[in-house]
Amino acid sequence: MDPHPLSADARANLDVVLHAIRRAERAAHREAEPVTLIAVSKTFDAEDIQPVLDAGHRVFGENRVQEAQGKWPALREAYEGVELHLIGPLQSNKAADAVALFDVIHTIDRPKIAGAIAKEIEAQGRAPKLFVQVNTGEEEQKAGVAPQDVDAFVKACREQYGLAIEGLMCIPPFDEPPAPHFALLQKFAKRNGLTGLSMGMSADFAEAVPFGATHVRVGSAIFGTRPKA
Ligand SMILES: *Cc1c(COP(=O)(O)O)cnc(C)c1O
């Protein structure tokens, strides 16, 4: 699906992806509001990540709290200005660790998590930016708030839990064209006065840009194919 031949050189791949994002921004007349590239480093070790840090990139995504705890504290010591995004499902017993480690959490999707995160923000005096994950394809196995519950859940996050929600996140079904899902997420965000849109992955990040993506999450197009978990 990736239109560009993937090189073993993550640094070269990073350049290709950044150029494709800048091209998509120009096509969508979005130069004034650039898209943030989250380099998704899940399953990759520190030595795979270092070349991308050396190239000057600082925004990374991980999907497991424990895995991120294992590699990022040392990398943060070595490189200034790292911004870490949690893009995987969150269990409430990991809320304390998640709030302590991550700068942005993309996967708020149920009252129990909203409550646990609110409690930790209060306790730690540290407030990661928050996105609500929406299950736009209404897939049984996928995390996220159902489309019909988005408005009420965002309202509850704000009013009941006192959380400042920044935006919405989705992972479109693997076997469907992503554009209708991007359009739906954009509509939900507008309706709820949210500016952040976390959508678009290796296969479709350029397609997410005209729909207002503020954050694209790109793993394999930068780091290469992941070993099957
Ligand atoms: C792994 C992952 C990505 C990156 O996927 P690629 O197809 O490798 O770019 C993006 N978002 C989430 C939520 C992920 O878990």
Image: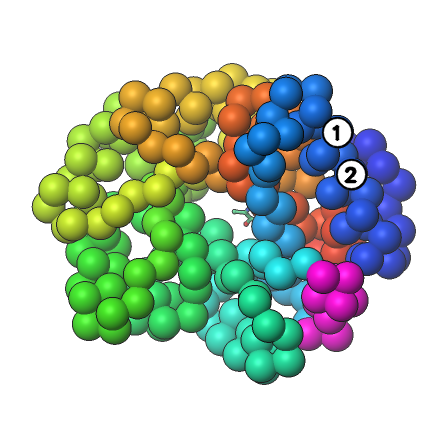
Identify the image quadrant of the N terminus. Answer: top right
Residue at figure coordinates x 51%, y 62% from the top left? 84
Residue at figure coordinates x 18%, y 66% from the top left? 122
In the shown orientation, is residue 167 left or right of residue 49? left
In the shown orientation, is residue 47 left or right of residue 123? right
Q: Could you give the CA–CA distance between mark 2 and mark 1, rounded to whole angstroms?
A: 6 Å
| Residue 209 coordinates in the image, percent (x, y) | 60, 28
Q: Is residue 88 above or below residue 54?
A: above
**Can residue 94 be seen here?**
no
Residue of label 1:
23
Residue of label 2:
19
- Classify mark 1: helix, strand or loop: helix
Identify the residue at the far front of this view. Answer: 32
Residue at figure coordinates x 85%, y 52% from the top left? 12
In the shown orientation, is residue 2 left or right of residue 184? right
| Residue 73 coordinates in the image, percent (x, y) | 53, 79
| Residue 134 coordinates in the image, percent (x, y) | 38, 35
Residue 47 in magenta stretch: yes
- Give the magenta range: 46-56
**Can residue 82 be seen here?**
yes
- Marks 2 and 1: CB-CB under 8 Å? yes
* CA neighbours of label 1 inside 10 A, class few (<14), some (14 to 19), many (20+): some
The chief SS type of the magenta part is helix
Residue at figure coordinates x 34%, y 32% from the top left? 194
Q: Nearer the viewer, residue 144 or 215?
A: 215
